[in-house]
Amino acid sequence: MSKVIKGNGSGRVLGTRTAQVIVCVVAAFLCFVPVFADLLTGRFPYAQVAGFSVYVGKQEGEMKPTPQITGDTVLTQTFNCYEYNIVDIELMSATYERTNTGTMHIELSVDDTGEEICSWDLDVSKLEDNHVFNVAVRDPQKFYVEDRKCRLTVTCPGAQEGNAVSLYYVDRDCYDGGELMINGEATGGDLYMLMTGTAGKTSYENTKVTLCFYLMLAVEAVLFFLFHRFGKKDVIDESGDE
């Protein structure tokens, strides 16, 4: 029985090519796992553009603390939102160099409908004097508030004078279409506030799909190079003839 070496043998070449195709398909699938995961968990809508921050209004004028927010105080700030949605809001607290106790309740809502966007209950003992703090919207994709007026309401149930905190505000009207009111009376100023939101209608998922696509191209290019460089090209055909 003779052995013939054939460079174009079909048996092992077919098997090798099939294995290469399977590897490429599996690699391509793995590159898109982040997108599939978002689809399964329902996180496909618009989301945060990382690092995009914008002042709601120009912070000009003298900054000062509001009166202490006691149990009978209702502090309300309205403002027009020009972002597609609101991701988080930064405020500045005054504790009067003491450790206060109690809870600060903050509610963000749509002004004309009263629909709540998000609310927070903060432990005031953890607030620092003359220091900024941040509250993050739990589901920013749920509410699209571009070109709508929003309202931020702050209360501290049960707080007493001498054991209460304040928020800093600017003593002039800074925000377009908004004002700071304390117990229904206008202060002539606005809260010191920094809002982070999504600019326009940039799609988080479109960006993720694009990145996954480029990752797939890079992975497939590497696999093609490896298969071409190290793959077996000759096949030993042992069927032979007597």
Image (tube, rainbow, N blue to C red):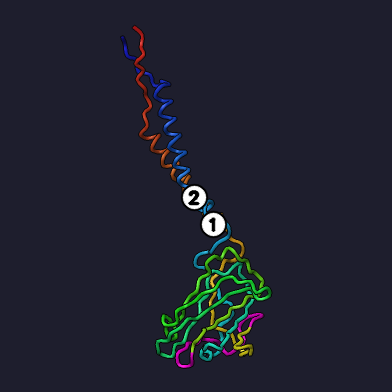
In this view, which residue lies farthest toward the right? 112
Give the answer, above or below, for where 49 lies relative to 129: above
Report the predominant secondary structure element of the magenta stretch.
loop
Give the answer, above or below, for where 241 lies relative to 158: above
SS class, disc 1:
loop
Could you tell me the amino acid type at mark 1? Arg
Residue at screen point 43% across, 90% down = 96
Residue 227 point in image, percent of width and height: 39, 35
Residue 43 disc label = 1
Q: Name the residue under label 2.
A: 212
| Sequence-first tag of 1 and 2 | 1
Q: Please say if the residues under marks 1 and 2 sit with CB atoms less than 8 Å apart.
A: no
Using the rendered view, name the quadrant where residue 197 is placed: bottom right
Out of 242 and 229, give the one closest to the viewer.
242
Could you tell me the amino acid type at mark 2? Cys
Q: Would you say residue 169 sits in the magenta stretch?
A: yes
Using the rendered view, name the quadrant where residue 59 is placed: bottom right
Query: Is 196 situated left or right of 95 in this image?
Result: right
Residue at screen point 50% across, 65% down = 50
Using the rendered view, name the quadrant where residue 108 is placed: bottom right
The quadrant of the image that shows the C terminus is top left
Residue 89 point in image, percent of width and height: 53, 75
Residue 215 point in image, percent of width and height: 46, 48
Instruction: Give the magenta part as a residue range.
Output: 160-178
SS class, disc 2:
helix
The quadrant of the image that shows the N terminus is top left
Discs 1/2, front: 1
Q: Residues within 10 Å of mark 1 (few under 14, many from 20)?
A: some
Residue at screen point 42% across, 37% down = 23
